[in-house]
Every structure is written in structure tokens, then in C-alpha cells.
Amino acid sequence: MVGHCGACCEGVRGIYMKSASADSTDFFAVRPECQDEVPKTKFKNKPGKTLSARKWQSAFSQDGHLDIAKVLSRIQRGGIHPSIKGVVWEFLLGCYDPKSTFDERSLLRQRRREQYEMWKSECKNMEPTIGSGRIITGPVITEGGIPIQDPSSSDLNNEGPGTPTPDISPRHDGSTSPSPVDSVEKKVLQWKLTLHQIDYFWRIGLDVVRTDRALIFYVNDSNLAKLWDVLCVYAWIDTDIGYCQGMNDLCSPMVILLQNEADAFWCFEHLMRRMRGNFKTSVSSIGVQSQLSTLAEIIKVVDPKLHQHLENIDGGEYLFAFRMLMVLFRRELSFMDAIYLWELMWAMEYNPNIFSQYEDPSTTTNNGAASKGKDKPLKQYGKFERKIVKSSSLDQQAALSVFLMAGVLEAKNKRLLKEATGLDDVVQILNDITGNLDAKKACREALKVHKKYLSKAKKS
């Protein structure tokens, strides 16, 4: 038996074993020279509301069963204390079943770590830079499959915090797949080309050295190398999508919050299970297009006047919302406020069946098939997911982030109608939310828009 202390120690390690009273900004400190370049953090730990390490520990039974309803209630009121964010995220994203025991999770964690190390070894055999503490920012192979003898290795210190972050804009991948070659297996060739290509969607190395460079955490080159390793391994196992720009922004918090690289990988991999559709592009469409179409439909229902105005100024495709939906508002908020927004959304979207839906039924801890939504008490669902279950909504694909974006547009309704005469005006008006978006208020507004949408959609 692991013992009751497992509840507070599980996943909480290293730099995060700080005093619960420490200021939240101490955990994700910004480099002094970057203080004026990044949005100011609004999030503050609120005793009695924020999920603390003590409350987290008390939510476990003696053998490790987690009272997920109690945890969700706390998170939705005040977020998660930085000292335990990583381990709590593992539950919110479906890495572990709240009904499992400490021992069961320990075994599953060990199996996943071994699996990650196996994949990482496969990658290292193909490209020695993996796991070496170095990062490659130049091509390692030609499109014809010929290895480049001396690929450029990044001098991480040359990529300072002032290096501009490339803009994530909707682009179609019009490249053709490389022809099979005798010397390099096609999958290996594609993966090596992914490590660095000039195309915006396919360059891990250059993206990594520009990721969250304002944070002191990434002054340590080994931390950047860890992010590089995780993304390279993910690109190897996800043969359908591989790596796309923006994944680095989603993965970075996992690397920062979870000291063990394999744990960070699996947390990111589970996030990608819900996000990967946004990155699936083709010659004719961009992955996030489905969410943009859903956003358009929502605004058309809840605010037809605004929707018509946006259509009149050629904004009917809602491409101005591309970046916000692609990386979940990472660029509009400080690091701390962005991850606070994420955990609020994940808690509100939480479905108690998420683990069994992800795992093969034979490997779940209850050894049973995934229950249908209404088989679990509603208190085990997040606020947003609970509304969907209650309403028996057929539109299960609309993520809370889409309604949050709709809430942002609604909040800017008057300015958009009065001042926006073209897409540039829309972008400029929406840029005003950078550093000014209140995460908790934005989630409340998203729930209101969702309620309004369901009500009006039902009547139509």
C-alpha cells in the first residue's frame, strides 16, 4: 500500500515543493528584462476558493480514491494552487481515473514511463540529438532521404527573450509527401523532415527556442531540451498529424509543471486527444475550421446582427479567432493567467467517463465498459458538461473555448458594430483583450452564451 501521503506527494516534486503561502508569481517568475514585455498576471491564490495542497490531499480516501466532485467545485471557484497544478491536471485531462487507487495509478504511471522511454530510444536511434540536451534548428535530412552531415545545432543562449514569436496564422499545407526511398523508411523520413522544415507548420527546433523565453524556467537549456524531446517523440507517434506550430505553446506548461519528462509527455498527449483536430490540415481546409464554423453558428444564433455585420465586412469565416482557439488564448494572457483559464475550462468540461473513454476497457481500473453520461451523478461533471447532459444536446463537439470566444465577441459587440469596417478593425478591437481578459469572468460569460444558445437553438 502506498499510504495516505501519496495524495499530497503524487506528482508534486522539485521546484513546486514550495510554501502554499508563496505568491503565485514566484512559481513562474519572469526574467527581469522582460517584465514590461509580457501581460501582467491577474490570478491570485484565494484562501477558501483556490484548491490548495491541503484540500487536494483531503479529497483522497485512504487507499487513493479521489472525490472528483469536491475537487471540481474548488477549481471552478478559484483555480489550483501552483504547487499541485501538474498532478491535478493529470486527472482533469483523463490521464488517471479518480476511482483508481494509489497503487493502481503507480503501476499505470510506471508502464507509461517505460513506454515513453521506449519511444524516445527509437527516436534517439534515428536522431542522436534526442535526449542529448541539444536542439537541432536546421534540417537533418534532405527531402530525398540523404542525411545532412552537420545539421546546425542551436546555441540556446542566442535565442533571447526578445526573439519575436512567429505568428500563428491559418495556412494550408500544400506540400506533397516525399517519395519512398530505399535508404530511409518513409515514416522515419517524414519524422526527420518534421524536426525542421521551412514551412511554418513543421519546425520543432525553431519553435522550441522561442517558447516562453520570458520565463526564468527556460534560462536553463536543459528545460528547453526537455520540451524539444517531448515534442519530437510526440511527432514520432502521431503519424497522422506529427508536429504543427502551436503545439509548443500547449506543451510548455506540462514541461514546467511536471518534473518527470515522461509524465509531462503523457499529460500533453492527453491534451492533444481533445485538441489534435485543430491541427489536422489539408490542402482544402485548416484543422481549426470546424471550431470557427461552430463559432459562426453560435454568433448567428445568439447575436444575428453582429454575425451579419461580420459577414458584410468579409469576416464571416471568423479567421480572426484562429490563434485564440488554436492555442487556447496563450498569447492573450500572461503564462499564469493562461493556465488558470485552461484549468477552469477543463474543470467545467470535465466528464467522469473521460478515462474509460480513452483507455481500453480491459485496462480500466473498474474492468467495465465506459458508462454512458447519465450513469454518473451530475455533481461529478463540470458545470459546462453538466448542462450538456441535462439538455441532451446533440451538439457535443462545441468546446467551451468556442463559447468563450463567442463571449469575447459579445463583450465587444458595440465597438465591433460601430467601429469595425474591415477585418483589420476586428483584429485591432480584439487585440485589446491582451492582458485584460479576466479568466473567471470570461468562463462565466461563456456559460451564459451557451445557455442562451441552447435556448434559442431549441426554439428555432
Image (spheres, helix red, strand yellow):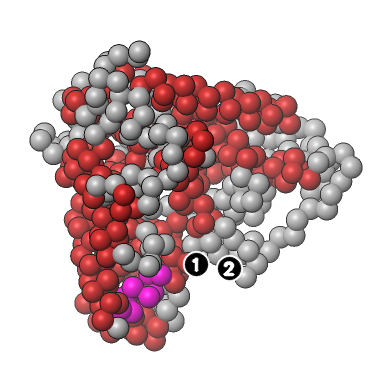
Percent of width and height locating residue 156: 54, 31
What residue sits 36% from the left and 29% below the top?
100
Q: Is residue 347 above or below residue 177?
A: above
Q: Residues within 10 Å of mark 2 (few under 14, many from 20)?
A: some
Res. 30 image quadrant? top left
Q: Residue furthest front?
A: 368
Give the magenta-colored segment's residue range. 294-304
Give the camera-side residue of 197 and 448.
Answer: 448
Q: Is residue 392 above or below residue 9?
A: below
Q: Quadrant of the C terminus?
A: bottom left
Res. 343 image quadrant? top left
Q: Residue furthest right?
A: 182
Question: Magenta region, mostly helix, strand or loop?
Answer: helix
- On the image, numbered disc 2 is attached to which residue? 285
Question: Do the residues under discs 2 and 1 have CB atoms within 8 angstroms?
Answer: yes
Q: Is residue 303 magenta?
A: yes
- On the image, numbered disc 1 is attached to which residue? 289
